[in-house]
Structure formats: structure tokens, C-alpha cells
Image: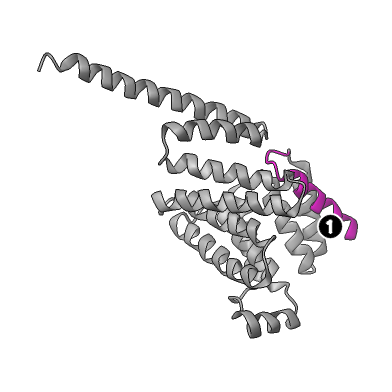
Amino acid sequence: MRRFLPFLLLVCGGVSLASGRTDALLERAAAAEAALESRRALEIYYEALRAQPDNPFILQKIARQYSDLVEDQRDAEAKKRYAQTALDYALRAVALEPDNPVNVLSLAICHGRLATYSDTRTKVKYSRLIKAEAERALALDPDYAWAHHVLGRWHHEVASLGRTARFIVALFYGGLPEASTAQAINHLERAVALEPDVMAHRVELGLTLHAAGHAERARIELERGLALPAREKHDVIVQARAQAALADL
């Protein structure tokens, strides 16, 4: 046993050092992500993935960076490629940890990204998946603000489809689940209640209220949203949508 003790200590020490190095990489990646440096964060997360190739947290983070980098690409083909890569990593994360609500919602977000660059049949298919995945994330964590946000936005966008569009979707593509503006508002109000300092929640609620004809309530939420600091990469787009809606009120 004594002969093996130095070997065991060496192995355990090596594992500890490797784990410590991965933790340090994840801290650096998180700092880059917080600074909205998605490309740099992606590089560091990849380095961490080489040390732990089956780590669902790292896989989901890589999916997030690819998703955030979609809008940085210049042409539609590159955007679609990044969106597809984001979905591929999200699928790997959820396969390893299927009961993690963050992983499940990541699928919904990635399907939403990819739907933008897909044909109509695929858009309809992904729309069904987005609803199902957001609902599953909420079943796993009823207080998951971003799951309420995604489901609220889904209800808003699907409920906004005109009668002709709904007929065509039903006739040729199998239709979409029922959606309502009231459900959209309920979910987005819940997202705001859970995370009142997140710009995207307030702005999306304001946009939905505007579409529903609640002008004064919409103005309040849009202005409150714009008063919040931009913390996420997509907040620049969120601000532009809010400003355009306010100009229309």
C-alpha cells in the first residue's frame, strides 16, 4: 500500500490542479461575458471544455456565446451557421443534464434564433418547440423569469398573426398552438415581478401592452425599461425597439 501512496497522491493532486485551472478559466470566461466580450468568452469556454468535454454548464455557455454572436455576423448564411452551432451545443448540454431549466430554455432560445433564418415549415416547427421548451423550463422552475419572458413573447408573436396567416399555417403546416395577448401579458408581468431590473422584461411587457392598446401602461414600462442600465449584449437592440415604440405612442 505504501508503494502506491505517492502515486495516489500524485493522481489526486493532478485532478485537484486540473479542477482548479478549469475553475479559473470559468471565472475569466464569466468576466469576459459580463463585459459583453462574447468572442473572448467563447475562446475561454472552449479552453475549459477541452479539460471537461462533458460539462453541461460549459456546453450551455458555449451555446449562449454563439447565440449572442449571431447578430455580429455580416451575412445571413453566417448568422444561420452561428445559430445552428448554438443549437448543437444546447442540445448537447440538455442531453447531459435534461432537468436543468437553464439548459432547457437554452433550446427554446436557440430554436428562436435559428427560426429567423429558416423556411416557413421549419419556422412553424420551431415555434411549437419554443413553446414546449419554455413550458418545460417553467415546470422545472416556476420562478424562472427568462422562461416567463420567452413564453410571454411567444404568446405575443403568435397571437399577433393575422387570420389569413393563421389559415395558411393551419392549412399547409399543421397549425400552431393557441396563443393569447392576455397570456403574453401575464407571463411578462411575472418576469418583471421576478427580475424588475432587467431591461428586456420591462420593454417586452411595454411592447405587448402597446400592441394590446394599453398606451399609458405601455409608455410607463418602456420608459422604465430604458432607464435601466444595459447589461446584456442584446440590450442595444432592446433599447432601439423601445425607442421606436415610444415614438409611435
The quadrant of the picture occupied by the N terminus is top left
**How crowded is the residue under tag 1: few (<14 C-alpha within 10 Å), some, or many (20+)?**
some
Q: Is residue 198 something that shows in the picture?
A: no
Residue position marked by numbered label 1 in the rendering: 245
Q: Nearer the viewer, residue 217 or 49?
A: 49
Q: Is residue 93 above or below residue 122?
A: above
Where residue 187 sits, quadrant-wise, is bottom right
Q: Nearer the viewer, residue 200 or 89?
A: 89
**Image point (52%, 27%), residue name:** 27
Disc 1 secondary structure class = helix
**Image point (65%, 85%), residue name:** 171
The amino acid pointed to by label 1 is Ala
Q: Nearer the viewer, residue 62 or 50?
A: 50
Left or right of residue 209: residue 31: left
| Residue farthest right in this picture | 247
Residue 148: percent from left, percent from top: 58, 58
Q: Is residue 214 something that shows in the picture?
A: yes
**Image point (15%, 18%), residue name:** 4
Task: Please provide the residue range marked out in magenta.
Answer: 230-249
| Residue farthest front in this picture | 77
Q: Nearer the viewer, residue 175 or 232?
A: 175
Count of numbered marks: 1
